[in-house]
Amino acid sequence: MIGKKHWVIAEGYLPALGPKPDEPALRSHETACILNAGPLEAVIELTLYFADREPIGPYAIRVPARRTLHLRFDDLQTPQAVPRETDYASVFISTVPVVIQHTRLDARSGDLALMTTLAYGSD
């Protein structure tokens, strides 16, 4: 089985929208790219942790078997929208092994800056 059941993204920051907030592809965002290569659906709980407030979550995420999901943090609304311009960390707990990669698009200056890294996985 490919992947791990527990994943952590220790560095999280949802930048300000940028100069084109009405164009979703060009506004600043963070994404957790989740690969479920296995034969069973992944049911994932996501919790966000902050330096100065209580955690938010869990957010309920599902990734069908043998599929991928590019989960944008700015699309998360329940139980609460992810605050912009605030440091946070993310913990994902999945029912089956998955692989998670973290990507940020920062469009604040009008230019696009892209950063990506593999999250930390453990069981």
Image: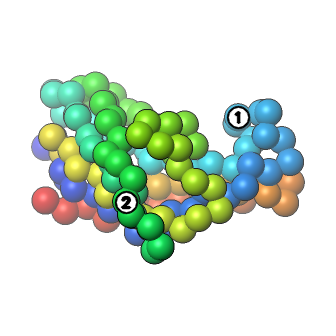
- The image quadrant that residue 120 belongs to is bottom left
- Under tag 2, what secondary structure? loop
- Residue 108 lies left or right of residue 65; in this view the side is right
- Under tag 1, what secondary structure? helix
The tag on residue 55 is: 2
Tell me what residue is drawn at x 65 percent, y 62 percent: 85
Name the colour scheme.
rainbow
Query: What is the x, y in percent for residue 7?
Result: 28, 57
Q: Nearer the viewer, residue 122 or 81?
A: 81
Tell me what residue is drawn at x 39 percent, y 53 percent: 56
As drawn, 64 above or below 116: above
Query: What is the x, y in percent for residue 35?
Result: 33, 40
As drawn, 10 above or below 27: below
Measured in 3D between alpha carbons, the distance from the residue under mark 1 to the one under mark 2, in whole angstroms, is 26 Å
- What amino acid does circle 1 point to? Pro
Q: Nearer the viewer, mark 1 or mark 2?
A: 2
The tag on residue 24 is: 1
Tell me what residue is drawn at x 34 percent, y 53 percent: 47
- Residue 1 lies left or right of residue 61; in this view the side is left
